[in-house]
Image (tube, grey):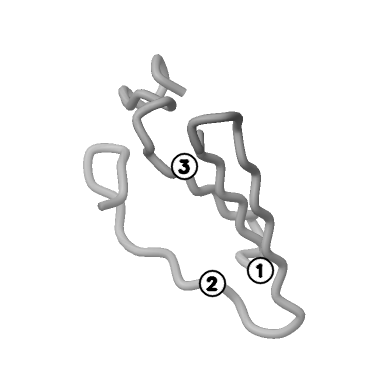
């Protein structure tokens, strides 16, 4: 992640990825003791994705 996104994965940054169907999200972050992976799937509807600037979303 550090090489690809230019962000330190151990600095508290939350990395978010969305599925192509836009109904699933994954969040990955370091909590100080280990890596946490959170997964959310919507039964109905989809997640709205903000615009991306310079390859990153703010």
Q: Which residue is mark 2?
A: 47
Q: Position of residue 58 (x, y in %)?
A: 25, 52
Dot 3: few (<14), some (14–19), or many (≥20) neighbours within 10 Å?
some
Quadrant in the picture for residue 28? top right
Tell me the SS state at disc 2. Answer: loop
Distance (Cα) linking label 2 and label 3: 16 Å
Considering only vertical position in the picture, is 25 above or below 3? below
The image quadrant that residue 24 belongs to is bottom right
Image x and y of residue 47, in percent: 54, 72
Q: Quadrant of residue 54?
A: top left
Residue at screen point 23% across, 46% down? 53
Q: Nearer the viewer, residue 31 or 1?
A: 31
Q: Secondary structure at mark 1?
A: loop
**Residue at image point 56% right, 49% down:** 27
Q: Foreground: 22 or 3?
A: 3
Name above or below for residue 47 compared with residue 11: below
Which residue, given by chain and number where applicable, does mark 1 sit on? Answer: 23
Q: Secondary structure at mark 3?
A: strand
Residue linked to disc 3: 15
């Amino acid at each position: 992640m550090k090489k690809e996104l230019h962000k330190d994965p151990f600095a508290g940054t939350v990395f978010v990825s969305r599925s192509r169907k836009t109904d699933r999200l994954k969040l990955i972050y370091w909590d100080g003791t280990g890596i946490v992976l959170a997964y959310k799937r919507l039964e109905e509807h989809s997640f709205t994705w903000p615009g991306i600037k310079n390859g990153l979303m703010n």
